[in-house]
Amino acid sequence: MIHYEYPLSERIRTLLRLEDLFDRFDAYAALAGSHAHHAALLTLFEMAEVAARADLKSDLLQELDRQKAVLTALRGNPHVQETTLEQVLTAIEAAHDGMYQLPGKVGQHLREDDWLMAIKQRAAIPGGMCEFDLPSYHFWLHQAAEKRLSELHKWLAPFSSIRAAVEIVLGLLRDSGQPERQHANHGSYQRMLESRNPQLIRVTLVDEQPCVPEISANKYLLNIRFVHAGSGAQRTCTELPIDFDLTFCTL
């Protein structure tokens, strides 16, 4: 199954981008090659740019406070597993405390490093990171993989509380909805949202289905157009019966 997610607010869009960047960093850092570690460092720069949104930290703190209040009220509820509830509340408190103690903007530690900023500046130039452009970076790429990895994780560490908060908020958001089986006629699906007011829409297809959803939505209407995947002219999948799962997620 393949999940396609469509955020309906800028805040959720930012959290999804950060989640993708954290996962991408892990994938690159897990490899030993210098090219992979180069890609991991560039991912860190992207992470800092996305996380530098002025209201990101305050938004996450407020959301964690709100979720903590909601979940705390469930203590003693016979329909709620107490152990799992306490684990979630402990994770929320740890992420909240970690973010609260973060000084300045997220990623500020990277901006204060002149060496890293010189690399970031050259990275914006196509082909601008050759050894004659950045000999000290060329030297770093030739260090032992363990040394490079240690420094990459050192630069990632200040993002850990933000990462924890992003995982908690998106996890609670995804768990809030129940998938509903739907069918698209002639490659399109339309639905009034009425009072649902979702923050995230998830469309789930079997991976053998050669179509991908193009989703557009506002607070009144959801429209999904299924188009052929891959290169070439995109044509609506009008000749295929398309069954999919649709999930509305709201915190």
Image (cartoon, rainbow, N blue to C red):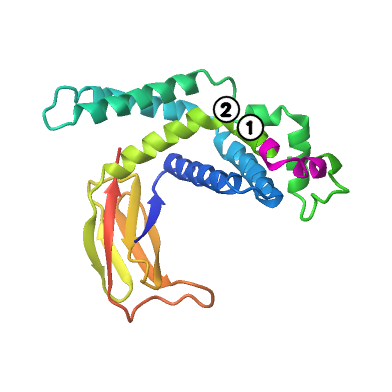
The CA span between labels 1 and 2 is 7 Å
Query: Looking at the picture, does residue 59 appear above or below residue 1?
Result: above
What amino acid is found at the position of numbered circle 1 in the picture? Trp
The secondary structure making up most of the magenta span is helix
Residue at coordinates 76% horizontally, 55% vertically from top-left?
126
Magenta stretch holds residue 212: no
Residue at coordinates 32% horizontally, 44% vertically from top-left?
174
Dividing the picture into quadrants, the one containing residue 138 is top right
Q: Position of residue 175 (x, y in %)?
A: 28, 43
In the rendered structure, are the residues bearing label 1 and label 2 in contact, judged by CB atoms less than 8 Å apart?
A: yes
Q: Which residue is mark 2?
A: 158
Badge 2: residue crowd in 10 Å (few <14, some 14–19, many ≥20): some
Q: Position of residue 187 (x, y in %)?
A: 33, 73
User: In front here: 33 or 176?
Assistant: 33
Residue that protrudes farthest toward the right in the picture: 132
Residue at coordinates 64% horizontally, 38% vertically from top-left?
149
- Is 118 placed left or right of 8 in the picture? right
Magenta stretch holds residue 141: yes
Label total for image: 2
Q: Which residue is mark 1?
A: 155
What amino acid is found at the position of numbered circle 2 in the picture? Pro
User: In front here: 47 or 149?
Assistant: 149
Assign a secondary structure to mark 1. Answer: helix
Dividing the picture into quadrants, the one containing residue 77 is top left
